[in-house]
Amino acid sequence: MRIGIVAGEHSGDQLAADLITALRKFQPDIEIEGIAGPQMLKAGCKAIIPMEQIAYMGLAEIIKHIPAILKVRKQILQHFLANPPDIFIGVDAPDFNLTLEEKLKGHGIKTVHYVSPSVWAWRQGRLKKIARAVDLMLTLLPFEAQFYLKKNIPVEFVGHYLADQIALENDTYFARQTLNLPQAAKIMALLPGSRSNEIHYLSEVFLQAAKKCQAHERSLIFIVPMVNEARKKQFIDRWQQVAPELPITIFVGQSPKVMQAADIILLASGTATLEAMLFKKPMVVAYRMAPLSYAIAKRLVKTKFIALPNLLAGKQIVPEFIQQEANAENLASALLDFLNNPAKEQNLQNEFLKLHHELRLNASEHAAQAILRLLRLS
């Protein structure tokens, strides 16, 4: 049995590696090849092309390398047409993989896409292409699968890998010990995002909200994870301008541990809200962007909520604030409401635990079984 696979970024590399391991558990003699990163290679995937040739970060980098990326896609397409696999799996990277999947499916090769693009939120025109491109969509979130079912696109919800990785019971003590933080302290984590523009639009209002919270809770200390040194410098510059008196400890590359160590989190909308939920942390979610970008997004985005816990629950269980509503007064008020109401925090943690169980399905093995079922039916 031969499988073709493509992962286009580092998060996809780990996801694909776990999937390959699971596939080999059920089908030990399977041959897997494609565009692979280092984790996939360790799991036993043969690299026709190394992932580094397409794994560019940021819009400017991607635009700069479009000719090279298109050349790689043409190469891998020609390889798979000349050496047809029994099935092809595109892992995330929808802009690269969906076109590849469509062409391969057109030549009679079964195709699977693992990790749905956010078509349920915006750019729903992509659904027509997805219907042409995939024999099976594997989703990480249950509401994504419900969305595809309504559109008559074959789909299976396999669970979320983060729900498998993160323990059902959070160990705050261990996280604080690891980060050398005081065990008895009241700690608030601030996560204004990983991108430069997110830090530009959110760090000031997050710092102002933190000041207001500390005025009510004098013992509060603050921890902030930054994705790299450049973003750390950007945040420090704003911190020194807005609230130099705030007791803040900054960590680089420790976002999950920082969330695990906190009592409460103020964060930008994104995957981090799912992690915070899995760590059972009360949170307040915010997002701000350039006024023109917001005006465009408001017309395009079709969801009622922006925070993943709210999307999963189908109702607002954590406060979320967008654009002008994401101001220091609103954010501080919502944070203090949690800090002053332990019963509210407990109810929220019960909701989070229920959602964690719903997502904890051993995603890699579930995905592998769905792929092998599709193969046996063909």
Image: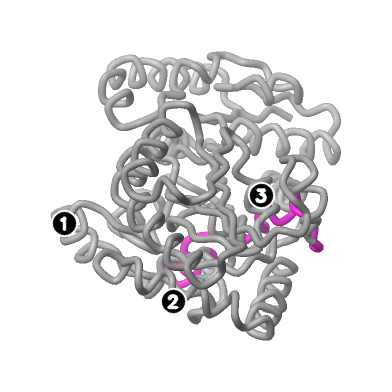
Disc 3 designates what residue?
Answer: 374
Q: Which mark is residue 108?
A: none
Q: Position of residue 373 (x, y in %)?
A: 72, 51
* Amino acid type shown at disc 3: Leu
Q: Residue at x 77, y 56 (%)?
A: 172
Q: Residue at x 31, y 18 (%)?
A: 65
For the residue pair 160 and 153, the one nearer the viewer reads as 160
For this view, does 135 lie left or right of residue 156? Answer: left
In this view of the protein, can residue 155 be seen by the observer? no
Callout 1: few (<14), some (14-19), or many (20+) C-alpha neighbours within 10 Å? few
Seen as rendered, the residue at the extreme left is 292
Disc 1 designates what residue?
Answer: 291
Which residues, given as a range, are shown in magenta?
Answer: 145-169
Q: Residue at x 74, y 61 (%)?
A: 360
* Amino acid type shown at disc 2: Ser
Disc 2 designates what residue?
Answer: 333
Vertical order, 320 against 110 (above or below): below
Q: How is the image coloured?
A: one colour
Who comes first in sequence, dot 3 or dot 1? Answer: 1
Mark 3 and mark 1: Cα distance apart in space? 46 Å
Q: Quadrant of residue 244?
A: top left
Q: Position of residue 34 (x, y in %)?
A: 58, 22
Q: Quadrant of the N terminus?
A: top right
Q: Position of residue 56 (x, y in %)?
A: 41, 24
* Amino acid type shown at disc 1: Pro
For this view, does 21 lie left or right of residue 252? Answer: right
82 in magenta: no
In this view of the protein, can residue 308 be seen by the observer? yes
Callout 3: few (<14), some (14-19), or many (20+) C-alpha neighbours within 10 Å? some
